[in-house]
Image: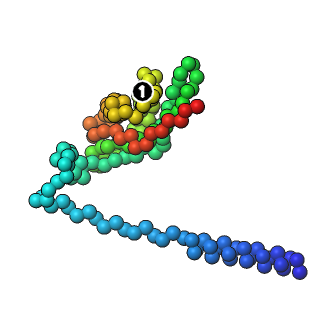
Amino acid sequence: MTKLLTILLALLGAATGIGAGLALKPAPAPVAAPCPEPDAKAETTPGAADWDSDAKSGEREYVKLNNQFVVPVVADKRVDSLVALSLSVEIDQGQSAALYSREPKLRDAFLQVLFDHANMGGFDGAFTRAGNMEILRNDLTDVARSIVGEAVRGVLITNIARQDS
């Protein structure tokens, strides 16, 4: 009798779990409609004319590097904080295979630039100031171009956080 009750409770639990899973299953994501092409006669927003014509025509793509970069910030011979960054590389359309084939070397060079930036105090204080970020972006772009080539248009810092100890 107890074996039968145990089996019935197990089946009831499994059925409840399956039912709850089906009931709480998220709806499929809606398919986004393509954006209409901008009308040539339409007025543009301020600053839109400053965009690169290549970027507007879709001749660029953005490659997100797979893992975050973690950089220790050393002060008084000890790790004072850690900075974690996510980076993406803006490249010419169709060049992502060339970037991925050189990703280990690119990651190594990016880490060296990030360590140098940290050692110069770039991640101290108000480290997200526009000037600091622009210097870091330019240095990362220069090293990316030296490894991947002129297909690299820029490096984007998509996420940055500092954890103080």
Outermost residue on the top side: it is 76
Q: Quadrant of residue 14?
A: bottom right
Is residue 140 at all visible to an observer of this figure?
no
Residue hosting label 1? 122
- Quadrant of residue 6 in the image? bottom right
Observer-nearest of 99 and 72? 72
Q: How many marks?
A: 1
Query: Which quadrant: the C terminus?
Result: top right
Vertical relation: 138 (above or below) 35: above
Residue 80 locus on image (x, y percent): 55, 27
Q: How is the image coloured?
A: rainbow
Badge 1 density bin: few <14, some 14–19, many ≥20, Cα 10 Å: many
Q: Is residue 117 above or below residue 64?
A: above
Measuring from the top left, give residue 117's x and y in whole percent: 42, 26
The foreground one among 102 and 164 is 164
Nearest the eye: 44 or 158: 44
Query: Looking at the picture, how far across and down is residue 57, in whole percent?
Result: 21, 52
Q: In the image, residue 18 lies at what x, y percent?
A: 64, 74
Residue located at (88% from left, 77% from top): 2
Residue 57 is left or right of residue 114, and the answer is left
**Residue at horizontal 56 percent and vertical 19 percent from the top:** 76
Quadrant of the image for the N terminus? bottom right
Whether residue 13 is visible, yes or no, is yes
Query: Please, what secondary structure does the residue beneath circle 1 have?
Result: loop
Residue situated furthest right in the rendering = 1
Question: Is 55 on the left-hand or right-hand side of 126?
Answer: left
Name the amino acid, label 1. Answer: Gly
In the drawing, does residue 133 fall left or right of residue 115? left
Q: Residue at x 40, y 34 (%)?
A: 128
Which quadrant holds residue 154?
top left
Q: Residue at x 57, y 71 (%)?
A: 24
